Image: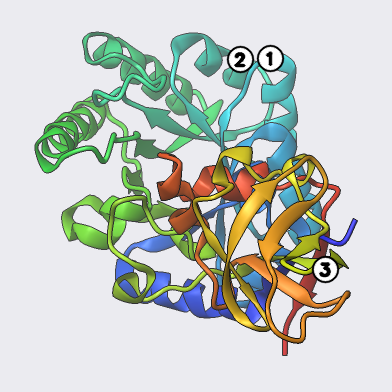
Amino acid sequence: MSAVLRVDLDAFAENLRRVRAQVAPAAHMLVVKDDAYNHGLAPIVARAWSEGVQWFGAFDVRTGLQVRAELGPEARIFVWIVATAEEAARAVAADLDIGVGDALLLEDVAAAGGRARVHLKIDSGLHRNGVRPEHWPDFVARAAALEADGILEVVGIWSHIAEASDAEDDAARAAFDAAVQTAQEAGLRPSLRHLSASAAAFARPEFRYDLARIGAFAYGIRPAGGPGEPELGVRPIAALTASVIRLDDEHAVIGIGALDGLPSTLAGLVDVRTPGGMRPLRALGLEQSIVDRWEDAAVGDVVTVYGEGAASATDLAERIGSIGEEIALRISPLVDRDYRSS
């Protein structure tokens, strides 16, 4: 196997600085779900921490525990998928911040022992879990009672939005603001409000509140059909490469294919970067792919499928009606990672 995913940690650090400047005075919560968008959790969180990132959005408890093990006790780690009472207990024991979007989970966290930090989630219209508005007053009243008894601390109110249209997002923000007010009327004084992910946090200051949960843009993955990387001020931090393993009169065969995570539907739709310039990706097999040959091509030459002067992951995704995150997340964990930093 000749495929390598090259990850530029210096480019990542530049993106982090750009994100921080864009969302200020809100803090940046770096989302590291799915093995840091398949870039490798350990080196990503270590570099982010060294660059001053203090909040990490870990999605699930398993990932949260990994981040805690990498960074130690000072990092703030937010998890929002807690499936069982046992997971709730592990999250509390590891001092994770827990996103709570239903009444049963609130009770599981309360029963876990210790004084848990929780962020209460309102369903602001996306219906990606969260407490429905009609149940919200009873929910926050119960949370306030548990906080008064010293069982937990409500540090945040949060939600997801669709980022599908300004009108939908405005309606979600209004629902969110109403939920915060209801929580305050119940006696809660959360210090953190967070609603937006990458796109809304960059484009609309009113959505940033106290924390902005940004993952994709920090890795240089732009939205499909949206502004380009130069407009956003970020650049892709990963490049997927493969070596030439065989040549014929017309083609170069490179050691990468569908088993490495490339969608087979990309064949015939994209160009890749070779030492002789951009060339069409003619065919994509399970383990090998075919590219038009260039002058002076040689076995061992490196071809870049995306990143580093080739198309971006989102460029590839747009050709097949997908999004950049899917291209990034499909890359097999068996593909070697090469981390670069000055």
Q: Does 144 sit above or below residue 176?
A: above
Q: Position of residue 270 (x, y in %)?
A: 51, 57
Can residue 40 be seen by looking at this rendering?
no
Q: Which residue is mark 2?
A: 108
Judging depth in this view, the residue of 11 and 240 nearest the camera is: 240
Mark 3: few/some/many CA within 10 Å (<14, 14-19, 20+): many
Residue located 44% across and 57% down the image: 315
Q: Say whether disc 2 or disc 3 marks the residue closer to the N-terminus.
A: 2
Q: Would residue 120 appear left or right of 180 to someone viewing this image?
A: right
C-beta proximity under 8 Å, tags 3 and 1: no
Label 2, label 1: how far apart the Cα atoms are:
5 Å
Q: Residue 332's image quarter?
A: top right
Can residue 39 be seen by looking at this rendering?
yes
Q: Position of residue 110 (x, y in %)?
A: 58, 19
Q: Secondary structure at mark 1?
A: helix
Q: Say whether disc 3 or disc 1 marks the residue closer to the N-terminus.
A: 1
Q: Does 11 sit above or below residue 171?
A: below
Amino acid beneath label 2: Asp
Amino acid beneath label 1: Ala
Residue located 44% across and 61% down the image: 217
Q: Which residue is mark 1?
A: 85
Label 2, label 3: how far apart the Cα atoms are:
54 Å
Q: Would residue 127 appear left or right of 64 to someone viewing this image?
A: left
Q: How many marks?
A: 3
Label 3, label 1: how far apart the Cα atoms are:
51 Å
